[in-house]
């Protein structure tokens, strides 16, 4: 979305969906999971970390990525599940660094448990990847103050696209809101700093939308300029 939200361009509101695709790669043991993580395409790691935000979390909603859910549900290892769950992808510069962190967490756990060296999971971990499908909502914003009105009405797919997926599309790895606002020179530097404090990972998309709506409403006084 970078060129569409650059300076002097309107903010074009998009929606999106993730279509899951099978890779044919699976792991039956924790050691196999570690081995597959070393070679699987980075897009698969992205899906298993971020894709859950766009799926209903009926199973193990306390765990924040598919690796941690599998560790809890299929390996019955809550210790590992908790360690994997607290890995925050925002803290890593790219998927390769995040890949290495997951591998290190798993290797540490393997060193601690003789049982996990050979234990077979109740169900395999199936590595998936995804294709993002982007929809044009035909809504355009010309003034940043309009975001205070628009964000509460955005779909969860729009929040995902503009606040999360944008981080792998924009040149500075930031969300679309900040990328657009930074095009107004330093006029909205304070607002950008406030947006940067919002955690994109641990809240649900609905909670994230509420946080952003409150932030923009407070900043613009609840009304458009």
Image: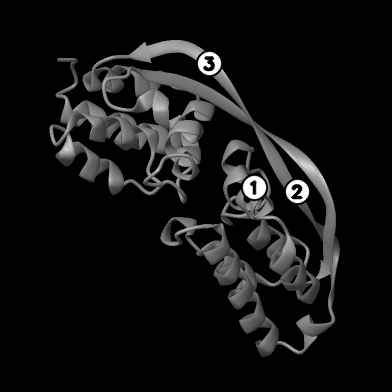
Q: Are the residues tagged 2 and 1 within 8 Å (C-beta)?
A: yes
| Residue 1, disc | none
Residue at the disc numbered 1 = 47
Q: Which residue is mark 2?
A: 128
Query: In x, y percent, where is residue 158?
Result: 49, 27
Q: Position of residue 159 (x, y in %)?
A: 46, 31
Q: Residue furthest top?
A: 138
Distance between the Cα atoms at labels 3 and 2?
26 Å
Q: Determine the secondary structure under disc 1.
A: helix
Q: CA distance from mark 2 to mark 1?
A: 7 Å
Q: Position of residue 153 (x, y in %)?
A: 41, 18
Marks 3 and 1 close (CB-CB < 8 Å): no
Q: Name the residue located 18 percent from the left edge and 16 percent from the top edge.
A: 223
Count of numbered labels shown in the rendering: 3
Asked whether residue 122 appears in the rendered view, the answer is yes
Q: Earlier in the sequence, mark 3 or mark 1?
A: 1
**Closer to the N terminus: mark 3 or mark 2?**
2
In the picture, the disc for residue 136 is 3
Q: Residue at x 59, y 75 (%)?
A: 105
Q: Is residue 29 left or right of residue 206?
A: right
Mark 3 and mark 2 residues within 8 Å of each other at the beta carbon: no
Determine whether the residue tagged by mark 2 lies in a helix, strand or loop: strand
User: Crowding near pointer 3: few (<14 within 10 Å), some, many (20+)?
Assistant: few
* Measured Cα–Cα span from mark 3 to mark 1: 22 Å
Q: In the rendered view, would you say 141 is above or below 81?
A: above
Closer to us: 59 or 133:
133
């Amino acid at each position: 979305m970078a060129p569409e939200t650059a300076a002097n361009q309107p903010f074009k509101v998009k929606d999106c969906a993730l279509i899951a695709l099978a890779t044919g790669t699976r792991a039956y043991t924790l050691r196999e999971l570690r081995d597959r993580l070393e070679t699987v395409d980075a897009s698969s790691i992205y899906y298993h970390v971020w894709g859950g935000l766009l799926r209903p979390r009926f199973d193990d909603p306390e765990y924040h990525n598919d690796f941690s859910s599998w560790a809890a549900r299929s390996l019955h290892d809550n210790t590992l599940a908790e360690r994997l769950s607290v890995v925050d992808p925002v803290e890593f510069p790219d998927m390769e660094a995040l890949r290495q962190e997951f591998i290190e967490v798993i290797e540490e756990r393997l060193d601690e448990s003789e049982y996990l060296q050979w234990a077979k999971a109740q169900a395999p971990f199936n590595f998936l990847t995804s294709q993002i499908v982007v929809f044009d909502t035909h809504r355009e914003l010309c003034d940043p103050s309009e975001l205070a009105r628009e964000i509460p009405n955005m779909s969860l797919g729009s929040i995902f696209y503009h606040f999360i997926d944008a981080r792998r599309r924009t040149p500075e790895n930031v969300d679309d809101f900040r990328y657009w606002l930074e095009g107004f020179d330093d006029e909205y530097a304070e607002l950008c700093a406030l947006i940067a404090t919002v955690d994109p990972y641990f809240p649900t998309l609905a909670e994230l939308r509420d946080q952003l709506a409150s932030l923009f409403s407070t900043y613009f006084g609840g009304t458009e300029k």
